[in-house]
Image: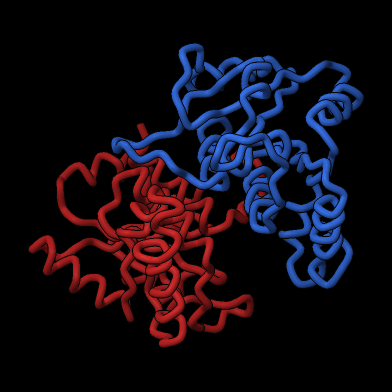
Chain colours: A red, B blue
Amino acid sequence: MIHYPVVNKNGDTIASAVTNLDIHDIARASRTFGIKKFYVVTPLKDQKVLVQKIISHWLTGMGAEYNPARRRALEIVQVEDSFEDVVEDIGLREGVKPKAVVTCAKKKEQSLGYDSFKELIQDGNPYILNFGTGWGLDKSFLDNADYILDPITGYTDYNHLSVRSAVSIILDRLLGK
Amino acid sequence: MIHYPVVNKNGDTIASAVTNLDIHDIARASRTFGIKKFYVVTPLKDQKVLVQKIISHWLTGMGAEYNPARRRALEIVQVEDSFEDVVEDIGLREGVKPKAVVTCAKKKEQSLGYDSFKELIQDGNPYILNFGTGWGLDKSFLDNADYILDPITGYTDYNHLSVRSAVSIILDRLLGK
């Protein structure tokens, strides 16, 4: 979950604020669908402190006893300064450089369908699914990705899903039973 | 989205509190996948006032100008006192009594797969997808439903999705492109 570099409503590149429910919802969906790590990327010190505080509450604080299932989800959350730090961390864990995958609400020429990508990831290599907060990932980030996935749509002209919904649906399409 | 009758952590039947992000996320997902109405069911007066306040902000208040896409999503939200009131409202709109569909995190004997249910709803009749907040729908509510859908799972033993994630995934499975 990328909080920098993302764009705001006017298209300016910004660092967005962390949303508490993003962390919970996406950690739970990641656990459900067997994702190894859920990285929360933000360069802002106060935001990193906030995420650590949320995680600690559920791992070792009052929350751990109150809701053990939530603890299991938040165990896989890790805060990093930048996308590059995520790549490095995965490289160290897996011994292979991960591929970067992005999604975009607008259909791109080179974008990949879910069935094709589902087949591709059977190769056992590490992949990072990147999701932008705010009004979406910065153009430079999109341009540097290895793969772009098709937008999630229904049979309407409306495509403004929350990032929580988009992540959940994409994990289900790729890793659902 | 049912806030009564649902159960709490101890299994007691309660009326749960409305969560602001549930309304936004589920309205956006409903719009994306072509759902006609998103009913927020709560018998609590202060909670109904809260939901109306959220909707008004985005339909006619500051939010309407700031984010017209959000307005289009929240236009389909309607607050009702009870499930019976939802049934009545749909009956009046559609001229046919709707069928009640529920989901449950635990697999039930008579539960239906998504492909079967996707086929079934092509009949053009109205269906209500009911989602419980808190720790889920009350047993009496589950027992009275016309259909139970399979739980959403991955290839793990963890099945604690947020209601926002579950709704998004189910709408995509039934109505995604």
Of all residues, the one furthest to the top in this rendering is B110
User: If the image is split into quadrants, where does the N terminus of chain A sit?
Assistant: bottom left
Please give the name of the residue rendered at 52% of the width and 59% of the height, measured from the top-left corner: A163
Q: How many marks?
A: 0
Q: Quadrant of residue A37?
A: bottom left
Please give the name of the residue rendered at 51% of the width and 55% of the height, measured from the top-left corner: A164
A25, above or below B42, in the image: below
Please give the name of the residue rendered at 44% of the width and 56% of the height, measured from the top-left corner: A26
Q: Is residue A84 left or right of residue A174?
A: left
Q: Is residue A70 left or right of residue B2?
A: left
A22, above or below B115, in the image: below
Q: Is residue A109 visible?
A: no
Task: Choose between B134 and A43: the one closer to the eye.
Answer: B134
Q: Quadrant of residue B60?
A: bottom right
Task: Choose between B62 and A151: the one closer to the eye.
Answer: B62
Task: Choose between A43 and B12: the one closer to the eye.
Answer: B12
Q: Quadrant of residue A116?
A: top left
